[in-house]
Amino acid sequence: MIQSVDRALRILTVLQGGHRLSLGEIAQRLDLPPSTVHGIVRTLLVHRMIVQEHDSGQYRLGPAVLTLGNVYLDTLELRSRVAPWAEDLARRTGFAVRTAVAMAEDVVVVHHEPRPDGSRQMPEVGIVIPAHASALGKAILAFDEEAAEGLLDGGILRSMTGETVTDARALGKQLDQVRLTGIAEEVEEAVLGECGLAAVLSDRLGGAVGAMGLVAPTSDWPVAAGVVASLRTAARSVSRELGATSWPPVGHAPRASEMGTRRRRPRPA
Amino acid sequence: MIQSVDRALRILTVLQGGHRLSLGEIAQRLDLPPSTVHGIVRTLLVHRMIVQEHDSGQYRLGPAVLTLGNVYLDTLELRSRVAPWAEDLARRTGFAVRTAVAMAEDVVVVHHEPRPDGSRQMPEVGIVIPAHASALGKAILAFDEEAAEGLLDGGILRSMTGETVTDARALGKQLDQVRLTGIAEEVEEAVLGECGLAAVLSDRLGGAVGAMGLVAPTSDWPVAAGVVASLRTAARSVSRELGATSWPPVGHAPRASEMGTRRRRPRPA
DNA sequence: GAATACCATTCGATAATGTCGAATGATGGT
DNA sequence: ACCATCATTCGACATTATCGAATGGTATTC
């Protein structure tokens, strides 16, 4: 891990939280001397990853991060494959449809099909949700051993609402259940008044590449059986397009037999 | 400029162009030894700025860049202020409305209000357009001396279509014209079949913080006088909300008298 | 099926590089 | 008019990144 690069990325992360910070504030939050931070900040400035407001001298994220995010979405095969199915699913069920991928202990929404009622809705692409507090996250965790480990072992499950599952053992049990059906649910665990129903998406490697799911107001919960079936069909279809041979995928990646797995490249560390 | 941070950002840029690269390819494009690149890449990997495909070993941009982009949009006051006006303008004119900010010699779209005809349209937030080939870019360049310098002096004006203005002198003349009205136009200079009309947006500092404009098919060009008036009204209103005292802003920031300008912080380098 | 070419990754010695404390200059507040 | 604050600059030091060579594994070729 290269120190200065790590520090640069931590600066971006800090800037992500506190949207507008002075050099001193950044230095303080990273526990570094201001002059050290200044050197890194100057470099980020040149690449437009951050900008400096000309009146206050404070720093904000810059336009370059936006174009990076845009390119990321373009490269995501998952996104282009899921789009038509999400549209169909939203029309069929009347709910908004989200698609997400795992990021550390959270999930990131990479596609958002608004509720088809014609109302104005915020685009939710790019938002981050704790994996353990969302149906999308549970669907992924159940089939991604690596991601689940961090949360189930030492991780602290932060409570979002009173309903959030904060006990690792309870979460583990839920994931066992998810493995059987490929479908996960969540009732007001992330935000009050909202429930989620999500299904894993897998590809030719059999892992969990992400999840798609719908967001329903608590007043519509539980959803009709047909809705669940539609979601399952959509997830299976997307997974098949991504090369998956079975759905839901086999629970957890093989452990002991992992040595026999074909990899076309050396193990990625 | 810190070397390793600069290299890390260049890696992201390279990954932005070639969407899927092996370590060797990255090293080659940056003219660096693979082991050097590997160290940086490993750090980017930890922060999820990039991900490594487990089958091919190749690298792609990661989900963290998406969340950064999302936060950038949230911090942009310009965006929230422009949104209602853009919606109104789109409905009033029937055209799609884009809002952009400057990034080096390009502009980046930070808001996109689709054509109000109900058709499915790609979200264009995050796309990058050469400043000299777009109405949005010209509107900004005319009032942003710093940005214009780079292009008018040594810069090469890359041709996008046969109509693109590639002569610096000709571009300069256009910008002089834009300064009089605050409005810039473009006819098939970026993509064939599309024309643009854009207006500067300024804030309390009097500079160009961005531009908003509409995209019209060539068949609808030139647009009605009422459309231009609506755009002007919208731009003036947004600028006023951002604290601008006059619109269009005074052409180019003052040169000789610049010393007298009040700045609340030391000059940002 | 054996051998080769390729590639990501690891390791360690070297010196180039980033780091940090102190100084600067300019600003806004008292 | 003074002081406190803040971004920025500078230079000496040693920590740190860099790079070449070696490793282990996979695809490809004959």
Image: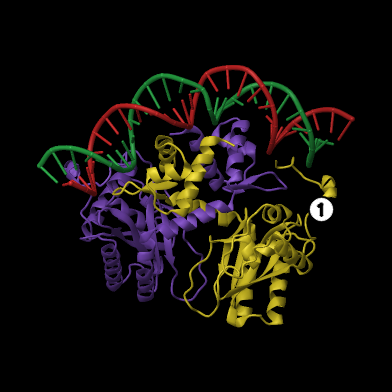
Chain colours: A purple, B yellow, C green, D red
Nearest the viewer among B76 and A132 is B76
Q: Where B238 sits versus A101, above or below?
A: below
Location of residue A76 with respect to B121 vertically, above or below: above
Relative image position of residue B185 (x, y in whole percent): 67, 71
Relative image position of residue A232 (x, y in whole percent): 27, 66
Front position in the image: B49 or A23: B49
Which quadrant of the figure has residue A94? bottom left
> In this rendering, is residue C7 above or below A4?
below
Q: Nearer the viewer, residue D11 or A223?
A: D11
- Residue type indicated by callout 1: Pro
Would residue A158 be visible to someone looking at this image? no
Relative placement, left or right, of A182 versus B253 is left
* Label 1 secondary element: loop
Task: Write down the residue under mark 1.
Answer: B254
Which residue is drawn at the image coordinates 43% and 38% (left, top)? B37
- Which quadrant: the C terminus of chain B? top right
Most foreground residue, B181 or A28: B181
Position of B17 relative to D13 (above/below):
below
**Residue A252 image position (x, y, % from top left):** 23, 49
Residue located 58% across and 37% down the image: A40
Task: Name the side, left or right, on which A206 lies relative to C11.
Answer: left
Residue C1 lies left or right of residue B101; in this view the side is: left
Q: Quadrant of the N terminus of chain B?
A: top right
Q: Indicate left or right for B25 with B190 as reference.
A: left
Chain letter behind tag 1: B
